[in-house]
Image: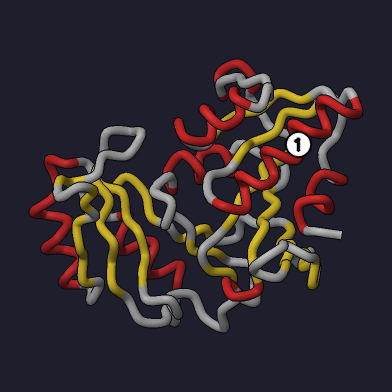
């Protein structure tokens, strides 16, 4: 069994499903569309990015807005880091704010990762994306530097990248974080910060697979 197949087992008929962004989420969306065609599964999706919305439409998954569906049954997404407490760093795919909003609107957040994404401490991979309003760039760069988070403006084709929300992304160069809630609070207190890639206390289940074929290695659940 793959982690994608395991995630499909958790999708209820007539469910309202948050659709994540990134490699693992894309694999889930394609498998979900096949389940819809072959088994008559009925779901409605809410996309976490325009890229995901385009993929879902191409594969025939009906999409709704958060305003239309309200509370979601579950969201299936990927992550860039997962620590032993199931806390996450997300956002390397540049959709972190919409991902966090959709996740917070869901009864359950299911995360699909390759084993290489497991870390002993958040920040092990050295990067934390932070979404900011463009007007606040000088302030955010200065304040993040003062926190020891060396910010680098993410550019695409040599111009500042704009998120689906019309914002910039600062990739903060960080070391392993000893107190993620404190860092989240400090960054969020900076005027102009829209959101960070720290997803703390949000994941209910993490499905871990090998990096090539997503073959299931283990299933981790948040302690109640």
Residue in the picture at 61% in, 36% down: 105
> Please, which residue is most extreme toward the left here?
138
Describe residue 109's horizontal placement relative to residue 88 as left or right. Answer: right
The 10 Å Cα crowd at callout 1, few under 14, some 14 to 19, many 20 or more, is: many
Q: Is residue 55 left or right of residue 61?
A: left
| Residue toward you, 128 or 213 | 213
Image coordinates of residue 1 in percent, x first then y, are: 87, 60
Q: Position of residue 108 (x, y in %)?
A: 72, 46
Residue 178 percent coordinates (x, y): 44, 82
**For the C terminus, which image quadrant?**
bottom right
Residue 112 found in image quarter:
bottom right
Q: Would residue 112 be seen by someone viewing this image from the given angle?
A: yes
In the rendered image, residue 68, in percent from the top left (x then y), is placed at 60, 16
- Report whether 208 appears left or right of 150: right
Q: Which image quadrant for residue 66? A: top right
Residue occupying the far right of the picture:
39
Q: Is residue 135 left or right of residue 90?
A: left
Quarter of the figure with residue 13 = top right
Q: Which residue: 66% across, 27% down?
A: 59
Which residue lies at the image location 36% right of the left edge and 34% below the top edge? 164
Q: Is residue 192 visible?
A: no
Which residue is labeled 1 in the image? 32
Q: How many marks?
A: 1
Residue at 72%, 56% in the rendered image:
204
Q: Secondary structure at mark 1?
A: helix
In the displayed orientation, state which residue is furthest to the top. 68
């Amino acid at each position: 069994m793959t982690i994608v197949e395991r995630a499909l087992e958790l999708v209820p008929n007539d469910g309202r499903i948050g659709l994540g962004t990134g490699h693992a989420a894309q694999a889930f969306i394609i498998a979900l569309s096949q389940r819809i065609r072959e088994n008559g599964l009925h779901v409605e999706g809410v996309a976490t990015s325009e890229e995901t919305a385009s993929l879902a439409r191409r594969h025939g998954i009906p999409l709704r807005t958060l305003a239309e569906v309200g509370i979601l049954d579950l969201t299936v997404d990927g992550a860039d880091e997962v620590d032993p407490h199931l806390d996450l760093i997300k956002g390397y795919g540049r959709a972190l704010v919409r991902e966090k909003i959709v996740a917070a609107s869901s009864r359950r957040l299911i995360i699909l990762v390759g084993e290489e994404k497991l870390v002993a401490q958040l920040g092990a991979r050295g990067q934390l994306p932070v979404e900011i309003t463009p007007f606040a760039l000088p302030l955010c760069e200065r304040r993040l530097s003062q926190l020891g988070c060396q910010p680098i403006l993410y550019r695409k084709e040599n111009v500042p990248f704009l998120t689906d929300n019309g914002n910039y992304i600062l990739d903060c160069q960080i070391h392993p974080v000893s107190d993620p809630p404190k860092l989240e609070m400090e960054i969020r207190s900076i005027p102009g910060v829209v959101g960070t890639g720290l997803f703390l206390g949000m994941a209910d289940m993490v499905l871990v697979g090998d990096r090539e074929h997503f073959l299931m290695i283990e299933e981790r659940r948040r302690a109640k």
